[in-house]
Image: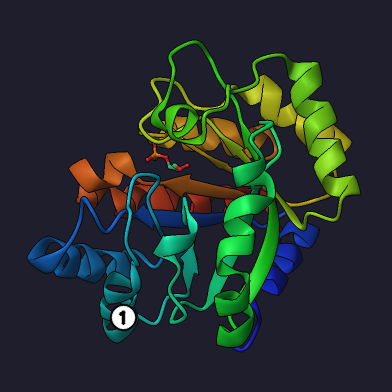
Amino acid sequence: MSDTVLNHIQNAHSVGKKLFAVLIDPEKCSGDSLLNFISLINKAKPDFIFVGGSQLRHSIDEAVIVIKEHSSIPVVLFIGNAVQFSPNADAMLVLSLISGRNPDFLIGQHVECAIEIKKSGIEAIPTGYVLVGRGQRTAVETVSGTDALSDTETIVRTAIAGELLGQRLIYLEAGSGAQSPVYDGVIAAVRDNVATPLIVGGGIRSTSMIDKALVAGADLIVVGNHLENTPSDIVPFVETVRRHNAANLS
Ligand code: 1GP
């Protein structure tokens, strides 16, 4: 891909083209199961492979190298802490957890790996990360020591504030393995108020959930857990996004 990852997302957003990313957590998927998953991913051709995990306490470089060796799909770091950083990915979402008030996830982890990121020359994409809750507490809330937002107006204000602070993407996150994905009313409300491309993930486990999020205004859908358990669903999931594009793009 000659384009940068951010350009790719922004260009798609400007014409209403929707995108799909599969999330690989190297702690849950490695060895032969990683290789088998990569070959399915290569068949389905999602737009991006996100790599990262909220719990990992070591670099994910090994997994990134394996994925890069076996796939030409752009690899984007989606890491939960500084030690997971790998210089070998194509890009990195530099997440700032703007829904919370824990300085470590607003700026602290970034300071930890700032020099490594700069030296690597990796494409770093400032991303406002917004945890959206619907009741059940998720691992990302526990790990980050923050509470998800549930009030739509506060979520909208937070997304706007992220945009005002220069975030290039807004990520609405229900949490990995969340019982329910981000409610489509919340996606639509944020969509109406920010021009920034919207990533939506957490708890998406069916084609109808993908459709709902796309119709509500998500630009990029991320699915991890469900595809770890049912890898072959990546084919219908990517097809759902393609069908949406075919029906809505002239
Ligand atoms: C989690 O948004 C991602 O950070 C994906 O969530 O694993 O629930 O698909 P799932």
Residue situated in front as seen by the camera: 206 or 111 = 111
Percent of width and height locating residue 68 = 34, 81
| Left or right position of 98 against 206 | right
| Left or right position of 195 against 17 | right
Under mark 1, the amino acid is Ile
Sort mark 1 into few (<14), some (14-19) or many (20+) by Cα contacts within 10 Å. some
Q: Is mark 1 within 8 Å of ligand 1?
A: no
Residue situated in front as seen by the camera: 92 or 114 = 114
Residue situated in front as seen by the camera: 109 or 173 = 109
Q: Is residue 119 above or below residue 123?
A: below
Q: Residue at x 81, y 18 (%)?
A: 153
Q: Residue at x 53, y 36 (%)?
A: 211
The residue pinned by badge 1 equals 65
Furthest toward the top, the residue is 135
Percent of width and height locating residue 58 = 32, 61
Which quadrant: the C terminus?
A: bottom right
Q: Residue at x 66, y 31 (%)?
A: 100
Residue 159 sits in which quadrant?
top right
Q: Residue at x 72, y 73 (%)?
A: 7
Percent of width and height locating residue 80 = 47, 50
Which quadrant: the N terminus?
A: bottom right
Q: Does the image show residue 216?
A: yes
Q: Does the image show residue 1?
A: no
Residue situated in front as seen by the camera: 65 or 7 = 65
Q: How many marks?
A: 1
Residue 61 sits in which quadrant?
bottom left
Percent of width and height locating residue 245 = 60, 54
| Left or right position of 102 against 181 | right
Q: Secondary structure at mark 1?
A: helix
Quarter of the render that holds ligand 1: top left
Furthest toward the left, the residue is 32
